Image: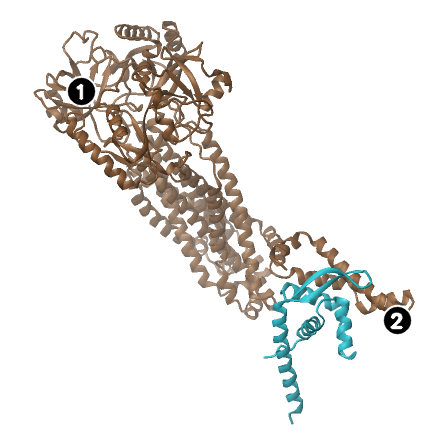
Chain colours: A brown, B cyan
C-alpha cells in the first residue's frame, strides 16, 4: 500500500473499517450462497458460515492492526503515549518547552533582522546586478557622475541620487518631507514601473529647472491624498517652487536604502529649486550616491577595470578636483556599503550570541532529558523485560523529544513573531524616516523549526546510550538509588558548566553594553543637550533668499531669546551628532596648491551665529566667540576646537591670532578656541573642527538651539507659537535636543537593548539549569542525607554534601564565562562608546550577578535538603 | 535457517493459490486451499484477512474490488512480481523445512 494512503488511513480509520467490513461480509455471503446451493436452509447456511468464520470483530481488529502497526500508525500511538507521559511530568515538560522556546525566540528574532539587514536581496528586479559606485569617501560629485555615466561600457545605466529634507505645501499647513533627488535614469536603473502616472526620465532633463516634476511614494500618496487617482497633474509647492505631480511609485518601493522611506522623488536638475543652491557644476563637491545596473554579460572585475580607467583619465583632466579619485563597486542598501561592515559585524555578533543562547538551552535540555532518563530507568527496564524492543523504547523517547521540540519551537516562533511585528512598526529615530520591515519570511520559519528539531532531537536523545546499556534484570532488582548512571552524571555536569559559562559571557556582554550606553549619555559631547530645545528650519523652504535670510535669522533668535525662561539662543548650519557634517580640507595660510594631498588637515566645518556656543553649552577655552559685527564686510574669522589648535599650532594659546586657508580666496583668522566634542558618531576619533560666523558663511538651513532654565518640554509650545507667529509659511521641526540625539545613540542603544535582552535570557537559562541540577541531586540523595543527619551531620555539612557539587560547577562555569566575556567585549568597543571590559563596575557587576543567580537557583533545593526529617525518610524506604 | 512458523505456511499457501489461480477473493482462496489439499488443510477463515492485508502492505499481492459470478462485490487479490519472488523463496524455505523435519524423524 502506498505511503500516502497509509497516512490517509491513519486519519480515515472509518474508511478502512468500512472496507474491511465489506470484505468480511462478502466472504460470509459467498459461503452462505454455497451452503444454500449444497442444500442447507438459509438459517443453517448462515449459522454455518458465521461459525466457520469466527468472530468477525476480532478478525476486523486484526486486519486493522496489520494495516496500522507499520511505523506510521505506531507514531500516532507513540505521540499519544508521549503526550500522556509529558502530562504526567508537567514541570519537566514545561521547563524543557520554555527553555527551548526562549532560545528559539531569540534566534528567530536575530535571524530575521539579519535576514532583513544583510541576507535578503533588495526587493528590486534582478537586484544582484545593482551596485553602488563609491568614491573613496562614499559620495560622488555630479560632474564626475556625468562622465561616468557617459563613458562607461559596463553598465546598463548609472543613476545619481541625494537625500534631502524639503518643505511641501499642498495648500494649507506647510510640512517637512524627505525627498530623494534623483537623476533621470534613476527609475530605469531600479527597473520598476510606476503604480500610477509616469516617472521622470532622462529625456525630461534639459538643464537646470527643466523638469519641475514630483513622484510620490505610495504611503505618502495614501496618507496625504487618500489614494486619489486624480492628483496626477496637480501642482504642489516644494520650498515655494511649483512642482507637478506626475506619478506614484509602487507600494513597496522606497529607493535603494534598506531602511530609509522617502516621501517623494524630484529630479536632480531641480536641485536649485529644492535646496536653494546648485552644486551640480562643482566637481569637488561630493554629495551624491551613485547606483549602477551592471550589464548582464559583464563581470564585476571587468566593470571595476572600466571604472578605474575612467578615474585615471579624470584625474589627469581635473587634477585639482579629482586628485586621488577612485571608484569602487559595493553592495547597495546600507548607505552604499558605508554602514555595511559595522552592521554586518554587529549582526554577526548578535547571531553568535543567539547561537550561544541556543547552546545554553541545549545544554539545559540535555541535562533535563538525562535526568529524566535516569528517573525512568526502572520504567524502561520494565518495558524491556516485558518484551518491548529497545528500538521501540528508543522510538518512544524520540517521540517525546520531537513533541517537546515542536512545542518549544512553536512557542518560540510565536514569541518571535510578536517581537518582530513590534520592531517592524517601530520608528527608532524621530528625526529620520527609518523603518525596519523585519517581518519573518519562510526562511525564518524554516530556520526556527530546523533549530528546534535539531536541538530537541540531539539532546533529547542524549540518554540513548543509557537505554542501550540497560540490563533489565539488574535494574528491576535493584532500587532506584543504586542506578549505575555515574557516567551520565559527569556528562550532565559538563553540559552544565558549558551552559553557565555561556550565560556568564552573555551577562558580561550585556553589562558592558549597558554601562557603555550610560557613559556615552554622560560623556563629554562638547555641548550640553539637557535643558535645550532644537528647531530645525530651512528658510529656503519659505522662499527666503539673499539679504532676507540673515535678517530673518536674527529676528528668529531675538524672538526666542525674548521668551521667558530662555537663557540663550543661537543657531548653526549643522548640529553635532545629527547626521550633518561638512568635511573640509584646510591649508596653511601661505599655501598655493589646494589639492587634498597638500592639506594640513581634514576637518569638519560649521557656521555658527553669535550666542550659539552659549546656547549649546560649549565652553570657550581662549579668545572670543562671534558677535553680530563679524559680518561679511568684516575680517574673515574662525573659532576652532582644541584638537584643531593642537594639531595645527601645537597648543590652545598658540592658535589665537593664527591664520589658515580654505582655498585661494578664503583666509581665516582664529579668534577663539572652544572645547573638543563629538561630531559625527560617539565612537569617532577626535576631529579637528572650525566654526565660521553664520554671517560670513551663510546658510538658509539652520538648527536653532534654545537653552532654558526649566524643563524644555514646558517651553516647547510657546517657542512653537513664537516661530509660527514670525512666519506661518515656514515649516520646521521642534524637539528637545536629547530627543534629536536618538540617531547618534541608536547604535549604542540597540546594542544595549539587544545585549541586555540576551543577557537576561542567559541568566534565566542559568537559573533553570542550576535549579534543575541542584534539586535533582538533592532529590537523588535524600536517603543518604537522611542517614547523615541521623548520624549527626550539621546543617553546613549537609548543605555541602547536597549542593557542594552544584556550586563548584557553578563557580567553574562562571569563572570561565567571565574571562571569555571580558575577552569578547573588546569587540563591543567598536559599537558602544567607552565599552571597556576592564571597567571595575562591569567586573563587580558580573561577579555579583552570577553570585545572585547561583544563590537564587540553589535556594529552594537547599531548603528542601535542610527540611529532611530523617526518621520519616528512613521509614519510607 | 528455514522459516517454519505457521504464519509462514499460511503466506506460502495464499501465494501459491494466487500463483495457480490468478485473481481470487478471500473466500475463493479458502476454498481452493481446502480443495487442492484434499480437505487436509483448512484455513482459519478469520486469520486469512489479516494475512492478506499484511501481504498487501508488503506489496506481495495487490487488490481490487470486482463482481463475483453471482454479481456480488468482493475484493480480489492477485500476485505481484515481488510476491512471485517471495513465493519462490517461501517454497524453497519450506522444502528445507520438510527435508529437515524428515531427516529428524528418520534419525535413529
**Relative to A353, does residue A46 appear above or below in the rendering?**
below
Could you tell which of marks 1 and 2 lies nearer the N-terminus? 2
Secondary structure beneath dot 2 equals loop
As drawn, which residue projects farthest toward the left? A590
Query: A379 or A426: which is nearer to us?
Result: A426
Residue drawn at (46%, 27%), measured in percent from left and top? A250
Image mark for residue A38: 2
Is residue A195 something one can see in this rendering?
Answer: yes
- Residue A460's label in the rendered image is none
Pinpoint the chain carrying mark 2.
A
| Residue A480 in the image, given as x and y percentages of width and height | 54, 63
Asked if residue A599 is positioned above or below residue A475 in the image, the reply reads: above
Answer with left or right where residue B67 lies relative to residue A785: right
Q: Furthest-right residue in view?
A: A41
Q: From this view, report whether residue B80 is shown above or below residue A673.
A: below
Camera-side residue of A566 and A594: A594
Measured as percent of width and height from the top left, residue A437 is found at 44, 32
Picture quarter with the C terminus of chain A: bottom right
In the figure, is residue A93 to the left or right of A600? Answer: right
In which quadrant of the rendered view does residue A553 lie?
Answer: top left
Quick check: can you spot residue A669?
Answer: no
Amino acid at each position: 500500500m502506498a505511503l500516502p494512503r497509509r497516512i490517509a488511513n491513519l486519519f480515515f480509520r472509518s474508511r478502512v473499517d468500512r472496507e474491511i467490513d465489506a470484505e468480511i461480509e462478502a466472504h460470509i455471503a459467498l459461503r452462505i450462497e454455497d451452503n444454500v446451493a449444497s442444500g442447507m436452509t438459509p438459517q443453517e447456511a448462515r449459522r454455518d458460515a458465521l461459525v466457520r468464520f469466527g468472530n468477525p470483530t476480532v478478525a476486523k481488529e486484526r486486519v486493522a492492526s496489520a494495516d496500522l502497526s507499520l511505523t506510521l500508525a505506531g507514531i500516532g500511538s507513540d505521540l499519544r503515549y508521549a503526550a500522556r507521559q509529558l502530562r504526567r511530568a508537567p514541570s519537566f515538560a514545561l521547563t524543557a518547552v520554555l527553555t527551548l522556546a526562549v532560545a528559539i525566540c531569540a534566534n528567530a528574532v536575530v535571524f530575521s533582522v539579519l535576514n532583513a539587514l544583510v541576507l535578503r536581496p533588495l526587493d528590486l528586479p534582478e537586484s544582484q546586478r545593482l551596485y553602488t559606485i563609491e568614491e573613496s569617501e562614499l559620495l560622488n560629485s555630479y560632474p564626475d557622475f556625468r562622465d561616468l555615466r557617459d563613458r562607461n561600457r559596463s553598465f546598463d545605466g548609472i543613476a545619481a541620487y541625494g537625500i534631502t529634507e524639503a518643505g511641501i505645501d499642498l495648500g494649507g499647513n506647510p510640512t517637512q518631507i524627505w525627498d530623494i533627488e534623483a537623476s533621470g535614469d534613476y527609475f530605469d536603473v531600479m527597473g520598476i514601473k510606476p503604480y500610477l502616472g509616469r516617472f521622470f526620465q532622462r529625456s525630461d532633463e534639459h538643464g537646470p529647472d527643466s523638469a519641475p516634476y514630483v513622484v510620490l511614494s505610495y504611503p505618502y500618496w495614501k496618507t496625504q491624498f487618500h489614494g486619489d487617482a486624480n492628483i496626477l497633474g496637480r501642482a504642489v509647492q516644494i520650498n515655494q517652487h511649483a512642482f507637478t505631480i506626475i506619478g506614484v511609485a509602487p507600494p513597496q518601493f522606497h529607493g535603494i536604502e534598506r531602511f530609509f522611506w522617502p516621501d517623494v522623488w524630484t529630479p536632480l536638475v531641480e536641485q536649485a529649486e529644492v535646496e536653494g543652491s546648485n552644486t551640480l557644476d562643482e566637481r569637488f563637491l561630493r554629495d551624491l550616491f551613485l547606483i549602477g545596473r551592471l550589464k548582464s554579460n559583464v563581470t564585476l572585475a571587468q566593470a571595476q577595470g572600466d571604472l578605474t580607467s575612467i578615474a585615471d583619465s579624470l584625474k589627469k583632466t581635473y587634477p585639482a578636483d579629482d586628485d586621488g579619485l577612485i571608484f569602487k563597486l559595493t553592495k547597495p542598501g546600507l548607505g552604499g556599503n558605508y554602514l555595511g561592515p559595522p552592521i554586518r559585524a554587529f549582526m554577526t555578533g548578535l547571531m553568535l550570541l543567539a547561537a550561544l543562547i541556543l547552546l545554553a538551552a541545549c545544554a539545559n535540555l540535555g541535562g533535563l532529558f538525562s535526568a529524566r532518563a535516569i528517573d525512568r530507568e526502572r520504567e524502561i527496564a520494565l518495558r524491556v523485560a516485558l518484551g518491548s524492543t529497545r528500538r521501540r523504547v528508543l522510538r518512544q523517547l524520540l517521540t517525546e523529544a520531537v513533541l517537546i521540540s515542536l512545542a518549544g519551537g512553536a512557542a518560540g516562533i510565536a514569541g518571535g513573531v510578536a517581537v518582530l511585528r513590534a520592531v517592524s512598526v517601530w520608528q527608532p529615530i524621530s528625526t529620520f524616516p527609518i523603518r525596519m520591515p523585519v517581518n519573518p519570511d519562510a526562511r525564518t520559519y524554516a530556520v526556527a523549526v530546523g533549530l528546534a528539531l535539531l536541538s530537541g532531537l540531539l539532546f533529547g536523545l542524549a540518554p540513548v546510550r543509557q537505554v542501550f546499556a540497560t540490563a533489565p534484570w539488574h535494574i528491576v532488582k535493584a532500587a532506584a538509588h543504586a542506578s549505575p548512571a555515574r557516567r551520565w552524571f559527569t556528562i550532565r555536569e559538563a553540559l552544565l558548566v558549558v551552559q553557565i559559562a555561556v550565560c556568564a559571557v552573555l551577562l558580561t556582554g550585556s553589562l558592558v553594553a549597558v554601562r557603555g550606553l550610560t557613559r556615552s549619555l554622560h560623556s563629554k559631547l562638547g555641548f550640553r543637550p539637557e535643558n535645550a530645545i532644537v528647531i530645525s528650519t530651512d528658510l529656503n523652504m519659505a522662499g527666503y533668499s539673499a539679504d532676507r535670510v540673515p535678517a530673518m535669522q536674527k529676528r528668529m533668535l531675538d524672538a526666542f531669546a525674548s521668551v521667558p525662561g530662555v537663557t540663550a539662543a543661537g543657531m548653526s548650519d549643522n548640529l553635532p551628532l545629527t547626521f550633518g557634517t561638512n568635511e573640509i580640507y584646510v591649508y596653511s595660510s601661505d599655501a598655493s596648491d589646494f589639492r587634498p594631498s597638500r592639506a594640513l588637515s581634514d576637518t569638519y566645518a560649521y557656521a555658527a551665529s553669535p550666542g550659539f556656543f552659549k546656547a549649546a553649552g560649549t565652553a570657550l577655552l581662549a579668545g572670543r566667540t562671534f558677535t553680530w559685527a563679524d559680518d561679511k564686510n568684516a575680517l574673515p574669522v574662525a573659532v576652532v576646537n582644541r584638537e584643531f589648535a593642537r594639531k595645527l599650532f601645537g597648543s590652545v594659546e598658540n592658535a589665537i591670532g593664527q591664520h589658515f586657508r580654505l582655498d585661494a580666496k578664503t583666509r581665516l583668522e582664529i579668534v577663539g578656541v572652544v572645547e573638543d566634542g563629538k561630531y559625527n558618531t560617539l565612537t569617532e576619533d577626535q576631529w579637528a573642527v572650525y566654526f565660521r560666523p553664520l554671517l560670513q558663511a551663510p546658510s538658509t538651513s539652520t538648527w536653532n538651539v534654545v537653552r532654558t532654565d526649566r524643563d524644555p518640554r514646558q517651553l516647547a509650545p510657546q517657542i512653537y507659537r513664537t516661530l509660527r507667529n514670525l512666519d506661518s509659511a515656514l515649516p520646521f521641526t521642534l524637539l528637545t535636543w536629547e530627543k534629536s540625539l536618538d540617531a547618534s545613540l541608536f547604535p549604542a542603544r540597540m546594542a544595549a537593548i539587544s545585549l541586555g535582552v540576551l543577557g537576561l535570557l542567559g541568566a534565566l537559562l542559568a537559573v533553570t539549569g542550576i535549579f534543575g541540577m541542584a534539586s535533582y541531586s538533592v532529590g537523588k540523595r535524600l536517603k543518604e542525607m537522611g542517614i547523615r543527619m541521623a548520624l549527626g551531620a550539621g546543617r553546613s555539612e549537609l548543605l555541602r554534601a547536597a549542593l557542594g557539587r552544584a556550586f563548584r560547577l557553578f563557580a567553574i562555569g562562571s569563572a570561565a564565562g567571565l574571562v571569555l566575556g571580558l575577552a569578547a567585549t573588546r569587540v563591543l568597543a567598536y559599537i558602544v562608546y567607552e565599552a571597556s571590559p576592564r571597567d571595575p563596575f562591569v567586573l563587580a557587576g558580573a561577579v555579583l550577578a552570577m553570585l545572585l543567580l547561583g544563590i537564587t537557583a540553589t535556594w529552594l533545593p537547599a531548603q528542601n535538603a535542610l527540611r529532611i526529617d530523617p526518621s520519616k525518610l528512613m521509614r519510607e524506604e | 535457517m528455514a522459516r517454519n512458523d505457521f504464519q509462514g505456511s499460511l503466506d506460502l499457501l495464499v501465494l501459491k493459490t494466487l500463483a495457480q489461480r490468478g485473481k481470487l477473493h478471500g473466500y475463493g482462496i479458502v476454498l481452493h486451499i481446502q480443495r487442492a489439499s484434499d480437505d487436509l488443510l483448512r484455513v482459519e477463515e478469520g486469520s486469512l484477512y489479516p494475512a492478506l492485508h499484511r501481504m498487501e502492505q508488503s506489496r506481495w499481492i495487490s487488490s481490487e474490488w470486482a463482481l463475483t459470478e453471482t454479481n456480488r462485490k468482493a475484493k480480489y487479490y492477485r500476485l505481484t512480481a515481488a510476491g512471485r519472488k517471495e513465493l519462490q523463496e517461501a517454497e524453497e524455505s519450506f522444502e528445507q523445512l520438510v527435508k529437515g523435519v524428515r531427516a529428524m524423524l528418520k534419525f535413529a
